[in-house]
Amino acid sequence: MAHLKTITPVDGSIYVERPLADGAAIETALDLAVTAQRAWAATPLAERIAVLSRAVDILVGEGDGIAQEITWQMGRPIGQTPGEVRGFADRARHMLKIAPEALGEIDPGQKPGFRLGIKRVPLGVVAVVAPWNYPYLTTVNAVIPALAAGNAVILKHSHQTPLVAERFQAALDGAGVAAGVFQHLHLSHGDTSRLIGDRRVAHVCFTGSVAGGHAVVQALSNGFASCGLELGGKDPAYVRADADLAHAIENIGDGIFFNSGQSCCGIERVYVAEPLYDAFVEGVAALARSYRLGDPTDPSTNLGPMVRTSSAEFVRAQVAEAVASGASALVDPRAFAADAVGTPYLAPQVLVGVDHSMRVMMEETFGPVAGIMKVKSDEEAIRLMNDSPYGLTAAIWTADAAAAERIADRIDTGTVFMNRCDYLDPGLAWTGVKDTGRGATLSRVGYEMLTRPKSYHFRLGT
């Protein structure tokens, strides 16, 4: 029997080992999900919300253990992982709070002798394929609203973070969710395609790479299942001349380096108005040099390893290529004792002298690195921000909200921030454009993705 092995980036040891489900297990899970979903959909919404609320409480109550597991599975410092549990709870509770309104019947306007209405009904079986970088925050975006809407869910989590799926299963089982309504499977890539391509699956929620998104679309090509895809990103920041410089340095720096840059909406390229450029560069470089790279189980560490050595080597190669093409690296990796080629421990880096001919400014890096360019106008900044195959978020630092909105209207992206970055508000739709994907999660719009409209046209009397 094939197994998954989770290699922890903390010390390179095997942290988790699990058998992979086979074809028979997939068949059993799908049959059970189809049957269970019918009964779950018939359960009153208030009861579904109550059960799911109990599951959220169970997970939050296990927060300390979950935080330790996140650190060991993917390397984020232990001082930061408890924040993921809090974020999970905020998103889950928000989506449950808005469920009655978001799933309520739509009144299109009535006419004499008729009752007209549009109900939002569940899709059926939803497959969720979740990533490792924010393993609870990305999973909750799909799992909780899908279940609240009356769907059954089968979760396939990353092999880097398999304990997350098991935690969800235990919490939902403990809260009283009926067997088959929520299931998790540890699967190979091939069997993941088999699962999501099965005609019993009505919708797929996938977060991962662009290549992975293409694989999902290909797996669905023989049927009519819908999908939501959150894929790659190369999110920009623009610092206008009227920005609060100190705040911009601190906030953008956090957007670049938090989680070792392994954030879907992390800042990877920065455009700075000419009057602030030198001071901004100096400030962000100083901030980068202040990080403490090391063992993420040490509470004093605020920059952990990347998820695996190959990821760190990919980032090192991007940086080296940029420097060879004329860029300057402002942070000396030798100042970080833990940084070492052949390990996932990678020092933060700031690059100047970059341009859009370099991979580090055009391809997703997903590491603690950003390139900074000087711009002379809003027009130049807009052109550069849009010069990307991706479009998840963009961030603008300015004292002028009207100017920020004018700029935001012209940026091809899913979310525009002003004076903040790298954050999800569950009241807003989380979505992307271009190669970043399709569909949306969170907010009432997220519920629209997980349900279908069903119209009721009743003629009263005879």
Image (cartoon, rainbow, N blue to C red):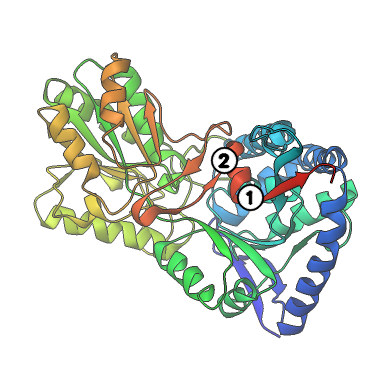
Q: Nearer the viewer, mark 1 or mark 2?
A: 2
Q: Is residue 351 visible?
A: no
Comparing 70 with 409, the one in front is: 409
- Residue 216 horizontal side relative to residue 339, left or right: right
Q: Amino acid at mark 1?
A: Ala
In the figure, 360 relative to 103: above or below? below
In the depicted view, which residue is nearer to us: 68 or 30?
A: 30
Q: Residue at x 83, y 63 (%)?
A: 180
The residue beneath circle 1 is 142
**What residue did someone put label 2 on?**
445
In-image side of 373 versus 409 (left or right): left
Residue 453, percent across and down? 65, 49
> Which quarter shows the N terminus?
bottom right
- Asked if residue 436 is positioned above or below residue 154 in the image, the reply reads above
| Few, some or many residues within 10 Å of mark 1 (<14, 14–19, 20+) | many
Residue at horizontal 34 percent and vertical 32 percent from the top:
395
Report, in whole angstroms, how far the alpha carbon at label 1 lies from the one at label 2.
Answer: 12 Å
The three-letter code of the residue at mark 2 reads Val
Q: Nearer the viewer, residue 34 or 185?
A: 34
Mark sitting earlier along the chain (1/2): 1
**59 on left or right of 447:** right
Residue 461: mark in rendering: none
Residue 146 seen by the camera: yes
